[in-house]
Image (cartoon, rainbow, N blue to C red):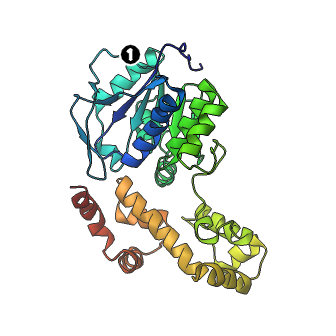
Amino acid sequence: MGLTVPSSEQAFRIGFLVLPQFSHFAFTSAVEPLRMANQLAGQTHYEWPVISVDGSAITASNGLSVGTDAAMADSTHYQMVFVCGGTDIQHAFDERILNWLRRLALHDVALGGLCTGTYVLARADLLNGYRATIHWQQISSIHEQLLFPLTEFVSDLFVIDRDRYTCSGGVAPLDLMLNIIRKQKGSALAEAISEEFIHERIRTHSDEQRNPLRAHLGSGHPKMEDAVRLMEANIEEPLTLDELAYHVGVSRRQLERLFKRYINNAPTRYYLALRLNRARQLLLQTNYSIIEAATACGFASPSHFSKCYHDFFGRPPNDERSWYRESLG
């Protein structure tokens, strides 16, 4: 089903369910385009009530406390509701939230997820048969654990699939909202909002969440980007440097020169960092044991994995979860 666009006299109500440790940046990136749409249009096109389980204030991952306008039990009408997630999403919701979202779906309320909020929609079985996206750090964990097999998770910046609106987080909600505003209120208003926020362009769903080398190389180097894509696709069974060079179409020595020239790093060290960062995601976002995380990231020996992990992160993997919990307060 598509969205029902209200008449010019009627505000479109988008509720934001904020969960403990939600991403304040993603939340603000979604709300500000709505505020600016009203300001530039000179009328209230949008309303954005903030919701929590019981109506109390919620603390974001940056420590800021955000007041709310409603509790889930309030009989308030929404045309769309976004779940705003952040860190430690597996422990940020309970069955009350899942049931509330299911009831909204039964009443034809469009549903969305910001940052890791998509995870909650998937846990409520509200993304079965849909394409969806989530922050790239969560995608690898979902694929690794074979979670939510009825949902097609993609690495797009955001996904609009019928009445589901999922977004990767960070500044991406700005682009998602600009696309919604453009569809409902026209390109002129959306582009004016983009200009107000000094946003270079309104990105579309086809834009990727991330390109790990573009941040270092500007427009990027094609051969290096190909090599990194191969590395990211072969974490559990790492390729040798000779295999990488062969598949990319350069010599081993040429590949080493490219990495040295552009990022002052050896390809083997870059590959190791990718594998260790993936292992850290698994330790923090799943219930994997240290041995399971090591195996999933291509380490044949747990002792070798522990040494590499300690050298890279400054703490052994068996201390990682407790340190992470303490850092969340």
Residue 54, horizontal then vertical, whole percent: 22, 28
**Within the image, what quadrant is residue 4 found in?**
top right
Is residue 197 visible in the rendered structure shown here? Answer: yes
Image spot of residue 144 (x, y percent)? 49, 53
Image point (35%, 50%), residue name:
87
Pick the front one: 278 or 13? 13
Q: Secondary structure at mark 1?
A: loop
Residue 119 position within the rendered picture, expressed as x and y whole percent measured from the top left: 43, 40
- The structure residue drawn at horizontal position 64% and vertical position 42%, both measured from the top left corner, is 204
Q: Which residue is mark 1?
A: 77
Q: Going 45% across and 20% down the picture, which residue do you hit?
A: 105
- Point out the image quarter for the C terminus: bottom left
Front residue of 79 and 240: 79
Q: Position of residue 290 (x, y in %)?
A: 36, 65
Give the side of residue 264 with respect to residue 256, left or right.
left
Q: Quadrant of residue 307?
A: bottom left
